[in-house]
Image (cartoon, rainbow, N blue to C red):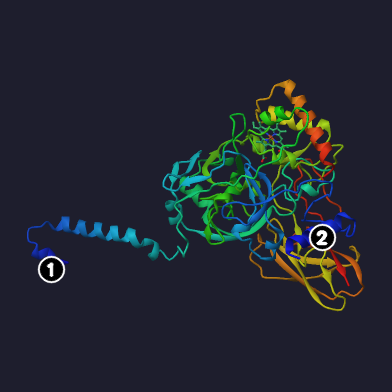
Amino acid sequence: MKERMRNAGGFPLVATGALGILSAWVSYLGVRDYWDSSTPNVPEIVATNVLLPYEEVHIPDGPNRVVFQTSCVICHSPRLIFGQPTISEAKWLEVVNKMVATYGAPIEPEDERKIVAYLVSVQADRGDR
Amino acid sequence: MNRRDWIRATAAAAAAGFAPGFVGCGVRESGSGVDPEPTVRFPGKVEMRVINDRPPCLETPWRFYREDFTPNHAFYVRWHLQAFPTSIDLASWRLRIGGNVERPLELSIDDLKKMDRTTIAAVNQCSGNSRSLFQPRVTGAQWRNGAMGNAKWTGVRLRDLLKRAGLKAGAVDVVFDGLDEGPLPGVPDFLKSLKADHALEAEPLVAFEMNGEPLPALNGFPARLVVPGWYATYWVKALTKIEVWDKSYDGYWMAKAYKIPANPRANESPDRLDAKIEPINRLNVRSFFTSPDRGSIVVSGTPITLSGIAFDGGSGIKRVEVSFDDGRTWRETMLGEDHGRFSFRRWKLEWTPTEAGERKLLVRATNRSDETQTADPIWNRGGFMRNVIESLAVVVV
C-alpha cells in the first residue's frame, strides 16, 4: 500500500488514507455478522408479515341475531364471546355495559337489551359449559 | 386408535363419570351438542387451541411441557387488541426511550444488538392461565392450563437502556407501549408500567431472541419486555416506546384491569368482593404433571416414571412432592437440571403401582421462601393466579 502511494506520486497522502479506511469500512459492513462472535448463527430476519388464518365462527340463530352481528364483531372475534361460560342475564348486561362504557362500543342503549336477550337465548340453547 | 381418537375417548369417559378425578388441561366436551373450540395452525405455530382468533389467543398443547423449554412454535399467544402488528419492517422499526430522561433515544434493532446482551431462562405465564377452571366461573379468555411457557430470553438489560438515556431525578414509573392499538378510538391502548426501582433491577430485559431465535411474530417480534418472575401482562410485545414518568402512571390497563385482591393469596369471596385491590405482580408457586397422560393405564407391579414441572416467581423451587393418598402423606421427588430461579424446574419420581383401580395422584411444590400450594383453590373476580394442588388420575390394571 505504501509502495503504491509513493508510486502514485502527487496523489495526496491524506486522500489515499481516507480511501483506505473507507474501503476497509465498507468491507467490514459486509462481513461484520461473521466477525461478531457475540452473534451466533441467528437467522437474520429483517421484516415479518404474517397472514392470519380465518376459521369461520358459527353465529347461532336467535332473537336479535342481526343486532348482535352488527354490534359485537367489530373489535374482536365473536369466538371470544361464544367461548364464555354460562352466566346470568345480569352478568351479560354487565359485559355489554363494559363494552360500551369502557371500550366505547358504538351501541344504542335500546340495542344493549336486545343483545343481552340474544346472548341469553343462545347460551340456553347450547347447554351448560 | 390415533392420539386424537384416544383423547376423545378419554374425554368421553371422563364426561360419563368414569374418571371423576380428572382436572387440569384437557378437552372440555360436554356431549350436549356443543362444538368444541377448534385447533388451528397459525403462521409459525403448531396446531393450537383457539381462544380468540381476532386478535389471536392460542393455547399451548400440553405435550410440549415435557420439554424444559417450550418450543417457539408451540409457545402460547395472547394479544389484547385487534389492531396488532402483522407486518413489521425492521428498517423503520425503532425503540424510543423518552419522558423524564436526560437524552431521549431512538434505537434501531442494530443499535440494540450492539449493546451488552444477556440471556435468562424465565417462565412467561398469563395472569389468567387456568381461568376456565375457576368455580364459580369468571368471564375473560377461557384458558385451561396452557397459557404459560418457559424460554431462554436474550436481549439488553432494561436498566442499561435507562442508564443510557439517563433517568432524571424523581422517576416514579416506567411505561411500556407496543405496536398494538385499539380497533376503535374508544379502546384504551395497551400500555403497562413498572415502578422505576423495579425497572432498574438486574432482571428485566428488552429481548429480541427467544430460545436462540428471533421472536416469532405472534410472540412480539422484533422485541418485547421480559419481566422474570412477573405475570406476562407486563411483558409488552412488539415494544416500541419506553417512557419515564415522574408520577404514577394511571392508564386503563394498569389502573382498572389486571387488579387482584390485596391479600397474600389474592383470594376473595364472590359474594363479597374485597375493597382493597392492587395490580397483579409476582407469580405464585405452581406444579403440574406432564407424564404420564391423564387417564393412562398403568400396570400393577411395573415401575413407571412420573414427571412434571414446577415454577414460582423467582425464589426458586425447593421441593416437589407427590401424594398417593389424597394428601395425607407426601413423597419427595427428584429435581432436574436447574436453569435458574425463574425457569421451569423438572421433577421426576419413580412409582410402582400396586392396588388395581383408579388412582388419583397429587403434586405440590414449595419454593425457597417456603411458599407452597394448597388443596383449596383461590377465587377472585379476574380469574387470576390459580395455583391449586393439581391432580392426575390413572387407572392401575
Question: Where is mark 1, residue-wise?
Answer: A3
Quadrant of the image occupied by residue B173? top right
SS type, badge 2: helix
Measuring from the top left, give residue A73's x and y in whole percent.
Answer: 66, 34
Residue B122: name its quadrant. bottom right
Whether residue B193 is visible to the viewer of this picture, yes or no, is: yes
Which residue occupies the extreme left position in the image? A9
To the question of a shared chain for discs 1 and 2, the answer is: no
Q: Amino acid at mark 2?
A: Thr
Q: Position of residue B209 (x, y in %)?
A: 53, 57
Cα distance between the residues tagged 1 and 2 = 83 Å
User: Dot 1 lies on which element?
Assistant: helix
Who's the residue at 48% across and 62% down the image?
A42
Image coordinates of residue A9 in percent, x first then y, are 7, 61
Mark 1, Cα crowd under 10 Å, few <14 / some 14-19 / many 20+, is: few
Q: Quadrant of the image for the N terminus of chain B?
A: bottom right
Horizontal side of B227 relative to B396 (left or right) equals left
Q: Which mark is residue B10?
A: 2
The chain under label 1 reads A
